Amino acid sequence: MANESEMKLYLLPEDCMVQILSFTSPHDACQLSLISTMVRDAAVSDLLWEKFLPSDYREIIERLVLPIVFASKKELFLKFFSPLLIDGGSKSFSIDRATSKKCYMLSARELSITWSTNPLYWCWKPLLHSSRFPEGVELIMVCWLEIKGKINTRMLSPRTTYGAYLIVNLAGRAFGLDSLPSEVSVNVDNHESKGIVYLRRNYANNRKQELEMVLMRHRVETLRSRVDRGGQERSLCEREDGWLEVELGEFYCDGVNHKEVTMCLKEVKGEHLKGGLIVEGVELRPK
């Protein structure tokens, strides 16, 4: 019976087997290639891996800062797992390993940061080996903190829920960032996802916070009452690359109606000085 089934399998033309495998995932296709030589040939064919690649992969290749060499569509797909700089280095592109969906990151240069062009308030500096981008920006001192990013859903994978994450770090001299929560939001058309976040590490010095409450209890409580607390409270999370991230919000990309997504973090109600926030960019990845 097994031999009869295998004989029938061999009767299928390769393009038919490719069509069958295309309804699986890249991971499943690799696993199924162990069944037989015929399935293996279909599982490594360019016809199959072209179906797994983003529909606009040729355009993405043209936008790469550094050209990549690949001998097959499968090899190209695997190279997309690592973030690659595009658009002159202002963005990066990759494919999510778990879902095979598109991921983008907007560098700090791609964001609209209030007063970032004034060296008295923000300092652009090289990020060396700690970032995929050559430079980021560090907050010197401002009272009005507002960071915005925009992307069109046309660039993203269809039928996918995305999360938007601000990628930052805190300098040793950081101050005033956790006196009040910052408001975070993602807006797409009439949909808004929002929350608040205290810009501090989870192991922040509790003594510092206690001293703040003793010295400025009335002022801090008055200011905190002004903050829009709609949505959930979020926190900075450690990333494997050494940076910190906070989710700004989420949205659904249907792939039909192309819309502009606006992502934002702001703290503009406290009127107090703050500094020491280092911004790498905003990452968009499937949830």
Image (cartoon, rainbow, N blue to C red):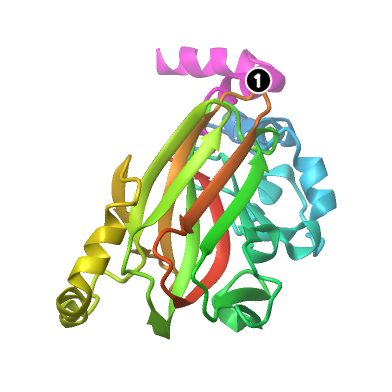
Q: Is residue 122 above or below residue 13?
A: below
Q: Where is residue 283 in the image (x, y as percent from the top left)?
A: 54, 53
Local packing at callout 1 (Cα closer than 10 Å; few below 14, some 14-19, many 20+) is: few
Residue drawn at (17%, 73%), measured in percent from left and top? 213
Quarter in which the C terminus is drawn: top left
Asked if residue 16 lies in the magenta stretch, the reply is yes
Q: Residue at x 58, y 62 (%)?
A: 281
Q: Can residue 35 be seen in this view?
A: no
Q: Is residue 95 above or below residue 250?
A: below
The kind of residue on which mark 1 rests is Val
Q: Where residue 94 sits in the image (x, y, percent)?
A: 62, 51
Residue 206 image-quadrant placement: bottom left
Residue at the spot 64% in from the left edge and 68% down from the top edge: 115
Q: Is residue 218 magenta?
A: no
Circle 1 residue: 256
The quarter holding residue 41 reads top right
Nearest to the observer: residue 137 or residue 241: 137
**Residue 253 occupies quadrant:** top right
Task: Give the x, y percent position of residue 20.
Answer: 58, 19
Magenta segment boundaries in residue numbering: 1-29
Q: Main secondary structure of the magenta part?
A: helix
Please give left or right for residue 170 compared with residue 63 in the image. left
| Placement of 143 over or under 28, stated as above or below | below
Q: Which residue lies furthest to the bottom in this view?
A: 173
Q: In this view, does 139 lie to the left or right of 54?
A: left
Going 26% across and 66% down the picture, which residue do you hit?
220
* Picture mark count: 1
Q: 85 or 54, which lies in front?
A: 85
